[in-house]
Amino acid sequence: MNLLAILLNVLWIVAGGGIAGVMFWAIAGLLLAITIIGLPFAIAAFRMARFALLPFGQKLVPAEAMGERRVPGTALANILWFILAGVWLWIYHVVVGIFLCLTIIGIPFGIANFKLASVSLRPLGRRAILHDQLMPVVER
């Protein structure tokens, strides 16, 4: 991770973006973990909470690009995710991102929220990797 990404991640956490992002993703994960059916969704939510804590210097890629086997039913699970939690997380990240982009200093943090909004819609089957690890990964 480069120095700029480290600095932006520190500012992200200090300014509260990391805490708020992790809080919303963790709440979604906890609510989904209450039921047995929601456990796979909870795992994805906690994985994305970790990504929301340090979004700078990371990129989301399909799990298949990391050498993982495609899990049957991921598309259906992403549709259920969208209905149960995705739309609410998407609304949060888009609204916060818009407000952050109103200031010049907030633009990088707004962009980070937009990145989190895009993954809010379908997080299952995605993995966060460092930009340094991008070379062997083939994106689809």
Image (cartoon, rainbow, N blue to C red):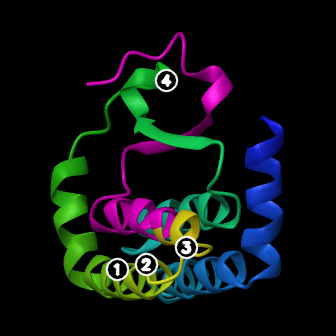
**Nearer to us: label 4 or label 1:** 1
Name the residue nearer the viewer: 57 or 110: 110
Return the x and y of residue 87 as percentages of the image width and height.
25, 82
Q: Amino acid at mark 4?
A: Met
**Nearer to us: label 3 or label 1:** 3
Mark pair 4, 2: CA separation: 29 Å
Tell me the quarter of the image containing the N terminus: top right
Name the residue nearer the viewer: 10 or 43: 10
Mark pair 3, 1: CA separation: 17 Å
Q: Could you tell me if the residues under marks 4 and 3 are in contact, i.e. CB atoms within 8 Å?
A: no
| Residue at disc 4, secondary structure | helix
N-terminal label among 4 and 2: 4
Residue drawn 69% across the image and 75% down it = 18
The residue that disc 2 covers is: 97
Q: Could you tell me if the residues under marks 4 and 2 are in contact, i.e. CB atoms within 8 Å?
A: no
Q: Is residue 87 left or right of residue 33?
A: left
Q: Amino acid at mark 1?
A: Val
Q: Is residue 80 left or right of residue 64?
A: left
N-terminal label among 3 and 1: 1
Residue drawn 49% across the image and 89% down it = 31
Residue 99 vs 104, above or below: the answer is below
Q: Could you tell me if the residues under marks 2 and 1 are in contact, i.e. CB atoms within 8 Å?
A: yes
**Nearer to us: label 4 or label 2:** 2
| Residue at disc 1, secondary structure | helix
The residue that disc 4 covers is: 66
N-terminal label among 4 and 1: 4
Which label number is shown at residue 104? 3
